[in-house]
């Protein structure tokens, strides 16, 4: 996908205005309210019909389009690495990795480099918040994991682009479409993190989250897909954010949904990562690979109710 400079300028302006609107007009969640919510599996198995959506982002990873995270978006600069602040030391972009275009897509590798174990992280915005993000819609990654035993921690997740424009004064949003640990369970999680600069009237003063795995959304999903203990083949990992629900999908079939809180009604950018923090030096077999065939985003042709 190429981002044209004129479109990009309009996008940044729209995002900045949208973030100002989010921070000043929406009611904030309280910790008690957020903690009272639950995952809902009543519509598990429902298939998403993407013929009713228009695609807004698409990358098949035929060419390398990942650049250093302080680069300007444009042709050949669609993803930014490492991007996420927590991964600056453990997932640096190097001349020899951690990304490589292969026959099936883009390979992200966790490997030992010298005396360090390094991972991979890429984001759809740079360190100024410039790049691709959208409010609401469906986000999807198609990927395959290659690992043996313990140590893998891969993820496809969303964060608020407003974090870059509100000077650390608003509650931070994180929506993990899936974190993959190699076990049998599906791990979607929604988070609220306190603002970096807490206001006297802040309603979220410490991290709160809801794990779909712990709330039994799909605790044994991968068991039937494993061969010799490894999940085989490419699968799609999707998340849809609507004004009412955050809905998680596996291979485009619903697993569960969580109520949309005001902090989720924000422009969201995408992250794809393979972390090192679960690597056990004496036990983990390296390298650990994750191959991403496609990342896409969609918006409904007919806007959501109450959008």
Image (cartoon, helix red, strand yellow):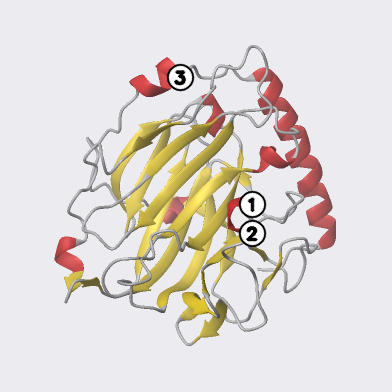
Distance (Cα) linking label 2 and label 1? 6 Å
Q: Is residue 113 above or below residue 169?
A: below
- Contact, CB < 8 Å: mark 3 with mark 2? no
Local SS, label 2 = loop
| Residue at 42% over, 76% down | 289
Contact (Cβ within 8 Å) of mark 2 with mark 1:
yes
Rendered location of residue 253, percent (x, y):
29, 53
Q: Earlier in the sequence, mark 1 or mark 3?
A: 3
- Determine which residue is flagged by label 3: 31
How dense is the environment of label 1, judged by Cα within 10 Å: few (below 14), some, or many (20 and up)? few
* Residues at marks 3 and 2, CA–CA distance in whole angstroms: 30 Å
Residue sitting at x 65%, y 23%:
198
Residue labelled with disc 1: 85
Location of residue 229 (image quadrant) = bottom left
Depth check, mark 3 against mark 2: the one in front is 2
For label 2, the crowd category at 10 Å Cα-Cα, with few meaning under 14, some 14 to 19 and many 20 or more, is some
Q: Position of residue 45 (x, y in %)?
A: 23, 48
Res. 67 mark: none
Residue 77, given in percent of the width and then of the height, sits at: 72, 69
> Can you say which quadrant of the picture contains the N terminus?
bottom right
Residue lying at the far bottom of the rendered structure: 103
**Which residue in the structure is indicated by mark 2?**
88
Residue 35: image quadrant is top left
The alpha-carbon separation of the residues under discs 1 and 3 comes to 25 Å
**If you read the primary sequence from the N terminus, does the residue marked by circle 3 or circle 2 appear first?**
3
Split into 4 quadrants, where in the image is the C terminus? top right
Q: Is residue 235 left or right of residue 289?
A: left
Which is closer to the viewer, label 1 or label 3? 1
Image position, residue 272 (x, y; %) = 52, 61
């Amino acid at each position: 996908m190429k981002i044209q400079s004129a479109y990009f300028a309009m996008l940044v302006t729209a995002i900045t205005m949208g973030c100002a609107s989010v921070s000043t007009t929406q009611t904030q969640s309280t910790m008690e309210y957020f903690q009272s919510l639950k995952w809902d599996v009543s519509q598990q198995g429902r298939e998403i019909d993407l013929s009713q959506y228009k695609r807004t982002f698409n990358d098949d990873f035929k060419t390398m389009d990942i650049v250093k995270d302080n680069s300007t978006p444009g042709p050949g600069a669609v993803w930014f690495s490492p991007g996420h602040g927590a991964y600056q030391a453990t997932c640096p972009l190097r001349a020899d990795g951690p990304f490589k275009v292969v026959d099936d897509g883009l390979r992200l590798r966790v490997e030992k480099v010298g005396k360090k174990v390094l991972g991979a992280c890429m984001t759809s915005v740079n360190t100024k918040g410039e790049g691709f993000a959208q409010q609401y819609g469906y986000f999807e990654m198609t990927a395959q994991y290659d690992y043996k035993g313990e140590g893998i921690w891969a993820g496809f997740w969303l964060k608020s682009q407003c974090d870059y424009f509100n000077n650390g004064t608003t509650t931070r949003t994180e929506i993990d479409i899936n974190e993959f640990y190699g076990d049998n369970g599906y791990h979607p999680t929604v988070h609220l993190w306190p603002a970096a600069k807490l206001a006297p009237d802040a309603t979220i003063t410490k991290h709160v989250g809801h794990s779909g795995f712990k709330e039994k959304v799909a605790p044994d999903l991968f068991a039937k897909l494993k061969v010799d203990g490894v999940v085989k083949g490419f699968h799609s990992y999707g998340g849809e954010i609507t004004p009412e629900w955050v809905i998680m999908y596996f291979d485009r079939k619903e697993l569960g949904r969580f109520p949309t809180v005001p902090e989720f009604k924000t422009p969201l950018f995408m992250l794809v990562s393979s972390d090192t923090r679960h690597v056990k030096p004496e036990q983990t077999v390296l390298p650990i690979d994750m191959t991403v065939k496609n990342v896409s985003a969609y918006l409904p042709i007919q806007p959501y109710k109450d959008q």
